[in-house]
Each structure stands twice: as C-alpha cells, then as structure tokens.
Image: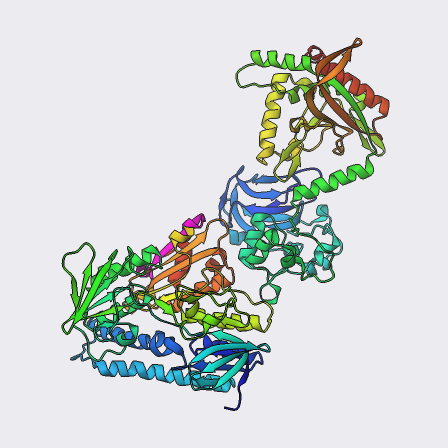
Amino acid sequence: MTDTQFDIAVIGGGPGGYVAAIRAAQLGLKPVVIERENLGGICLNWGCIPTKALLRAAELRHSIDEMADFGITVGEVKVDLAAVVKRSRKVAGRLSMGVKHLLKKNKVTVIAAEAKLGAAKDGLRQINLSNGDMVSAKHVIIATGARARALPNIEANGKTILTYREAMVPETMPESLIIVGSGAIGSEFASFYHDMGVKVTLVEALDRILPVEDEDVSAFVQKSFEKRGIKIMTGVKLQAVTSDANGVQASIEGQDKPLQASRMILAVGITGNTENLGLEATKIKVDRGHIVTDQWGATGEAGIYAIGDVTGPPWLAHKASHEGIICVEKITGQKDVHAIGAGAVPGCTYCRPQVASVGMTEAAAKQAGHDLKIGQFPFAGNGKAIALGDDGGFVKTIFDAKTGELLGAHMVGPEVTELIQGYAIARTLEATEAELMATIFPHPTLSEAMHESVLDAYDRAIHF
Amino acid sequence: MAIEIKMPALSPTMTTGTLAKWLVGEGDRVNSGDVIAEIETDKATMEVESVDDGVMAKIFVDAGTENVAVGAVIAVLAEDGETASDVAKAGLQEPSSPVPVTSVAAEAKERAEPVPVTAAPVKAVLVAAPAPQSKSSDKPRIFASPLARRIAADRNIALEGITGSGPYGRILRRDVESAATAPIAQTTAALAGATQQGDSYLVANSQMRKAIASRLQDSKQQAPHFYLTVDCVIDNLLEARKSLNAKAAEGIKISVNDMIIRAAAMALIAVPEANASWEGENTRLFRHADIAMAVAIDGGLITPIVWAAEQKGLAALSQVTTDLAARARDGKLAANEYTGGSFTISNLGMFGVREFAAVINPPHGGILAVGAGEQRPIVIDGNLAVATVMSVTLSADHRAVDGAVGARWLQAFKGFVENPVTMLL
C-alpha cells in the first residue's frame, strides 16, 4: 500500500459512508473508505435495492391476475423462483459496481478490510486493518450500519428462522410463513411472499401494523392485507419458538395452540454494528446498541464521528447519506450547514399498497399541542388511479391551523413512494397551505390527490 | 354606469391607509350597507360599507396594500343590468400602474411628485401616497419563506431585522423563532460592524404605534407644556358615589372616573378660557366640554370622546363611558368617536400611581393626569386628620392656556370634586 495517511477515513461503504467519502473528495479532502464486504452496504446489497427487485417481480405476478380486467388474456403463468432471486442479485451487483466506479471517479481510496480504531497521535487517528496494515486519518467517520436484531428467546438459524438476509434469497418457497414484526421490512416481506403464493401470518407486538405510521394508514394497510388473505395478529407477545425439520412453532402468550408455519422471518428492528471497532478504548458512548452522537455526528471522542444506522433510528439509507454530507461539511467548516430537522426524513414502505410519509402523524401533532387542519383525499377520486386500475388508498395532510405549516403528510396507495418528495420539498421550503393550493398539479396524475388533500384540509376539495 | 369605490377618509388626519382585507370578491353581489372591506388607519381597523347596490366588477387594490391614498379608486361595482365585462369595456381599465406597496422601490421612485387626490381624473387613477420616509422606497426585497412570514406576522416580529440562514440569506422559520428567543450570536453576530444590539429583537410598529409616536412627539416639541398639581379630598365624592349607585337603576354603576369626567366638564364650562385649542392664527374656544378619555388597548391606547360631557348626567355619562371603553378595547370605534375634542383625562390611579404628568393629546389644550385616591394625613384647622386624597396634575398648552387660567380651572375642578353636590346641579 502506498498511501496510508488520509484526511478522512470512513469505516463502512454503505449509503452513509460512500456518500460521505464522495462529499469529502468534492471538498478537496483525501478520503479513504474501509469496507469489509460489499460497497453499497446493506441497502444496496441486502436491503432496499434487492427487495425492490423482488417486490417488482411480485407486483408483476399480481398484475397478471388482473389482466382480464384490462381485456388481456394470459396463458399459463409460472414463477421461476431461482430466476427471480437471480435477477435481484444481479440488480444489487450492478449497483455495487456503480458505487465502486463513483468512488474511483472521485479519487476515493477503497480498502477491503475490517477496521479497528487505534491510538491518536499528532492529530491523527490510527486505524488497524484486518489485513495487517495500518492507516491514519485526521477524522474518522464510523458508518458501519446495523444488522437484524435478535429477540432474547428466538435465535435465527438461517434455515427455518430467518432474518432479512436469508429471506431475500430463498431457494424454495415455504408453504407458510410467520413474519415477526410489521415495520417496513416485515410488511414488505409479507407482501412479497403472499404474492408469491405463500400463506403469511404477520405478527406484531404493538396494537397495529406499521406502528410508526399514521393510524389511518396502519388501518388501511391492515384491511388491505387481510383482504388479500394475509393473516394479521397484533398485540402479540411471543413466548417461545421451536423449530424442527417440519417448520417452526411459536407459542403465544394467552393462547393454548402454538402458531405453526414452515418458516419464520424475524423483522423486529436492527442493532448497530458497534463491535470490534475498538470503541472501548475511546470516550465514545454506546447506548442500546447504537453510538451516541450530537446532531452533527460528533461522538464523545474528538475527531471521531458516526452516521447512519449505527447511530440509531430511523434506519433509513437516505438519512444516513444526508448525515454523511452534513458531517463532512461540518468537519470542513462549510457555511450554512443545518442538522436534520424533526420530521424531515421521509419514510417509504414498498408493500402493496405502498406507504409513504413525512413529518408528524396526527396523533403526534395533537400531542405536540397543535391546532390542526386535516385533509384526506381517496385515490378513488383520482382519474389516473382509476385508469391504472389501482385506486385504493388515500393522501392525508396535516396542517397547523395557526401558521399553515405542513406538519405531516401520509400516503397509502399507488406509487406514493414516488410522490412523497413533493411534500418533503414543500416542508423544506417552508411552504404553507397557500402555496400548495396555488400550485398547479398536472392532470391526469396521481399527484392531483396531493393537491386535493391540501384543499380538503381547508374544506375546499373539488373532486370529493 | 359603473360605480367607483374610493379609498375613504376615515378620520380628518388620514391621508393614506392600509387596505387590510376584502370581504367580497370579484363577481360577488353587493348591497348597499354591506361591509365590503376593512381598512387599517393610524388608529384602528375600520369597516367600509358599500353605498350602492351592484356586483363587484373589479378589485384594483389587493388586500394588504399599504399607503393607499385617500380618494384612490380601490374597486369598481357593476350596476344592476351591467356585467363585469361591460364595466371593463366601458373604459374603466385597471390602472396602468398598480397601487404601489412601499417595497416596490422602482415605481415609488419614479413617482417623485404625488398626484393630489382631488386632481384625480374620473378614470380610475390610483396614486401613490408619498412614502412616509424616503427610506421605505429603497427597501430591498426581503427573502423569507412563507412559513417564516406567517410566524413573523403572527408574533409581530419585523423581518427587516432578521438575518436569514437559508440559501442566499433566505429567512426561514428557525431564524424568526430564534430572533425572538435566541442569544445574540444567532441574530447579530453576522452584522459585522453594526452596533452591538444586546439580546434583543425587532417588533414591527403598528399603525397605531406610529400614530402615537408621531402625535405625542409633535405635542412635546410644539406645545409648551406646563404642569399644575393639586390634591383633592374625595371622601365626599366616594360617599356620594356610594349612595348614587345604591339608588341607581339596574345595570348602572357610576365609577369614580365618571365623576371625575363630570367634574372636569363642569370646570371647563365654568372656566371657558381653559377650554381652548391653539390653531396658530387663532385660538379655538369650545362651547362644550368634549372630553377624551384615554383607554389602554392591546398595543397602545386610544382616546374616545364623551361629547358635550357637561350635558350628561352621571347615569348617562356612565353608560357612554362603559360603551366607549368596551368598543375601544374591541377596536370597534368609528373614526368620529375618537377624533376631535378639547380636553383629555388620563387616569392611572388603578395602578397605584400617586401622581404623574401626561403629554397633551393634540389639538387639545390640556390633559388631566389623575392619580390614585389614597388615605393620607391632612391638616384641618391645625389638627391632623386622615382623608382620602387624590392628586391630579393638569398639563396645559401654554400657547392657548395661561398659568392663571389653568390654576383657576384646577380650582374649579377641585371644588366640584370636593363638593360633589355642586356638580350634580
């Protein structure tokens, strides 16, 4: 190795780490990314992207069932699971190559190794690499991400009890499946496996599925899942899970008969990858599996920062990327760097129906003491949605009655994950209801429902 | 024929006003007597009623426009049988230049000479009122987010004093919020070379605030004030009030202030030279005691007038003052209810103020500052006694009222207050 001294060392090449490194290079610094596995991290290799590829296959499979409605007759339909999974891996592989290219283009050094923090000397932090080398850098950004959290009484074995990692590369389809946890990951797998013909039971400890979303959205998705045949159990406390060659049995508090299925997926949240980083010798604090930082990513140890999933929820790639940019800009003393504001991170779930939201739920807004103006518009009143044959769902907007601030927006239905950015921009620009009302939304588009929802908050909806 | 609606003069001193709000939109049916707009003057927000029937054909002046000249055409009504487009065709086009808002710098500059309102031709020509200060026409556009503007307006914070932290210095919500709460560093550190402001922020001055400032500054600069203070023993007055209220009709409650107004009115009639206003070439002498009473309201004060107070008995006076005070606090006084008069009474007794000197409210000739009635030791015939004493201070405009006249007025006032029977005559 020729170069061993850098301005910034980024540990982890996921969407937080590689973006931070590119931004550092743009600002004239000399960065290094140290990645132990695949560039692009979980998101690109084992998360967001490959699951979207799987869900696309499921969606196409589902749409074949609706072809008759469109006057199209389809012959025998066969799903080649191996090919579906292969395509998903190919998509991930292509994007990982893309990240490699981007880093090269920006002259970011990439080292394939595990990293462990060493001593600080002359303003440089030493980093010991698993390949025996050592590098040093003025600043270190920990972007090691997270992994599936285990439940105290359930251990994933990778065969019958799976985490997302095994769940996205199935060799065979199970006959039946229990999914524990109904957040974004659990709900997406429920949707995928059900569309692929698996009997799915979705189990949630809290009183509703997608518990971080607005209650109206949770209720709509639950109804829609149940209508498709997904079994949903909420308020469930799992006691013990056993598994054998025939499948898994899960005993539930207050129920005599255990739940049975061929396989189980654990989707009960994630925990930060904080081990073997040499944190013990520093002043960095770890709280419940996550590194504690301030709003700029600074840890308790001077010169060491942390961003993304390793710092805690929401565990979202776009949050990690944004934190990476803020962190580097702050390190380099850029002007006008602003921490991520409350409610500024949009969230998307790609189950069928899709879910997207930004800002506060109605309950949170009420609890915060706002007087509210709430609008809701169903896609059943939207021409484009009806033409698409996908008119389930709605758009809900929540305004502060006094200031007209868009406190939150919640959407469920066709392509809403592509629509939510409109509200995110409105929030960043600090638009009020007046600007949203005065904006012309093109016809016929799904986005018209966004306009109508705003109008409805002020009793001015036209098409409902 | 189309009917022009012009910016009304809601008070004699009004030359421009802010068109606060339209209550009808273009195309709306308007009947005579309907309130069609709200106008903010230097004193209050006033309602504008339509005097004709018709349909609102065209609104020329947007809500929120400041400095609309009195007499400017602000809208046009189509008469029955006409349509809005008829009106437009009839040659009543929208004025070539929009009514300037003070921030429209270029236009305000071009119009160096204000067109006198009376010379405005029949065709709707809207003229710019001369900007109150040349500064305002040079005002740069303020870049602020819609939400920041709302919050600033809501909290009455001036955007002018805020440094924006957004792209290209755009003022964002956080800037407005921190301007009101944050330590100095946030707002003023960026103003390199500027005077250290300390931990402070700017509040936009309302029309009322500006009116108070300019009128009272004029008063102190132009009217040579002199001050006379006298102590009044008010035990008899309190006693009289008690028995009057005991016998008064349901709903009538005479206040000490009502009795003070009554006494001041009687004194103005008894010493007519004190009931005067300086007008330069002449001094105006009033036949009635038109007494303004200072009422503190949100963001300032207003002085509604009890006209011919000397002709009102205490019961009637009480009803008038109660009504005026209530409507003053609601901002619902008509312009003629607070414009004019010859004399003011300002009472801070309820705050425990012993005595104070008030600033004359021009064009009045005097103002009586009333302190608290409190028990004090007094000497009667060489013996010490306790009495309820109220100190009052007359501020008089020496141009119109001489010291001896003021002293005689105060003597008369004291006489009525100390022997309330005489003021009931």
Q: Nearer the viewer, residue A356 or A176?
A: A176
Q: Is residue A184 above or below residue A118?
A: above
Q: Position of residue B127 (x, y in %)?
A: 68, 52
The residue depicted at 58 percent of the width and 14 percent of the height is: B245
Colour pattern: rainbow
Q: Position of residue A172 (x, y in %)?
A: 19, 78
Quarter in which the C terminus of chain A is drawn = bottom left
The residue at the far bottom in this view is: A2
Q: Quadrant of residue B6?
A: top right
The residue depicted at 77 percent of the width and 26 percent of the height is: B394
Q: Is residue B317 left or right of residue A261?
A: right
Q: How many marks?
A: 0
**Residue A385: within the magenta?**
no
Q: Nearer the viewer, residue A288 or B201?
A: A288
Q: Is residue A87 above or below residue A419?
A: below
Q: Is residue B332 left or right of residue B415?
A: left
Q: Quadrant of residue A329?
A: bottom right
**Residue A371: within the magenta?**
yes
The residue depicted at 18 percent of the width and 70 percent of the height is: A243
Q: Position of residue A46 (x, y in %)?
A: 34, 77
Q: Please say whether residue A458 is visible from this viewpoint.
A: no
Q: Position of residue B297 (x, y in %)?
A: 62, 35
Q: Is residue B147 left or right of residue B308?
A: left
Q: Please say whether residue B207 is visible from this viewpoint.
A: yes
- The range drawn in magenta is A367-382
Q: Is residue B147 above or below residue A70?
A: above
Q: Quadrant of residue B346?
A: top right
